[in-house]
Amino acid sequence: MANILVVGPHPDDQELGMGGSIIRLAEQGHSVLLLDITNGEPTPYGDPATRAAEARAALAHLSPEGGLPVRRLCLGMPNRFVEHSIEARHKVAGVIRAHQADIVFTPYFRDAHPDHIAVTRIVEDARFDAKLTKIDMPEPPAAVDADGNETPMPVGDPIYPRWLFYYYATHLRWVADPNFLLDVTGCVEQKIASIRAYHTQFVLPEKNRGIVDWVEASATYFGSRIGTRAAEPFYTNEPIGLASLEGVAGVR
């Protein structure tokens, strides 16, 4: 089983972009940690305490019965002021080492939101920094699960995550151009519930309620591309190796 780190500039980005895949990966027994770079505040209807409670509530929908509980932690960088810096890179590298991440997911690199662009640059460089010897990385805060149980995150040995994948949570009005899709059939209802757990973001603001509808429609559309009921899109700069065609949609 793999240790998987899913990085979001703000709480709810991971759920919007790949909530179904988070559920599916946890269901399969992988250890999934969500890293929120900021607490997402200020927003018109939220505050730090409420947003933290919403992020924790979302975990209850992302953690399937019988699978490993999904955990998350927040680095608390300033929302709307995230900068690509060595300090920021090393904070994320500390999380990579603490989780001993084999696979890292981060937002797609083309975006209209400065925080998203900065976070993706930080994660790309932190992947490299995490492998460097003789450089100490800062210890991240404790991770928390849906029940509020905390897990300390001591920094481990240097590691270079084998894979860096990009998910789509972009603020640009364009159609994603993925080069692979994950089947999330059976996970969409829980994904939508995890998004709606952010009451101050997707329930109270009337203008944001439609986002939930097009996220659900997107899952149906991408599922139709691979012959399943639902799927989520991803991008990689590095080729994925297949030992055989078994498991490729449509191949038996």
Image: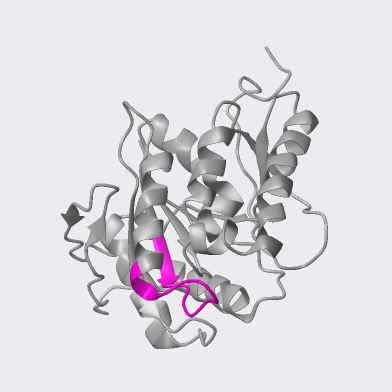
- In front here: 249 or 129? 249
Task: Where is residue 108? Give x, y as percent.
Answer: 65, 62
Q: Is residue 196 above or below residue 158?
A: above
Assess whether residue 39 is covered by the magenta stretch: yes
- In front here: 216 or 165? 216
- In front here: 165 or 183? 183
Residue 142 in sight from this viewpoint: yes
Location of the N terminus (image quadrant):
top left
Q: Is residue 174 above or below residue 23?
A: below
Query: How many numbered discs sit on the rendered protein?
Result: 0
Residue 167, picture quadrant: bottom right
Residue occupying the point 66% across, 23% down: 245
Residue 31, picture quadrant: top left
Q: Is residue 219 above or below residue 156?
A: above
Q: In the rendered view, does 217 fall on the left or right side of 247? A: right
- Residue range of the region highlighted in magenta in the rendering: 35-49
Residue occupying the point 56% across, 75% down: 121
Residue occupying the point 41% across, 75% down: 47
Assess whether residue 76 is covered by the magenta stretch: no
Q: In the rendered view, does 83 fall on the left or right side of 147? A: right
Residue 159 in sight from this viewpoint: no
Q: Residue furthest top?
A: 252
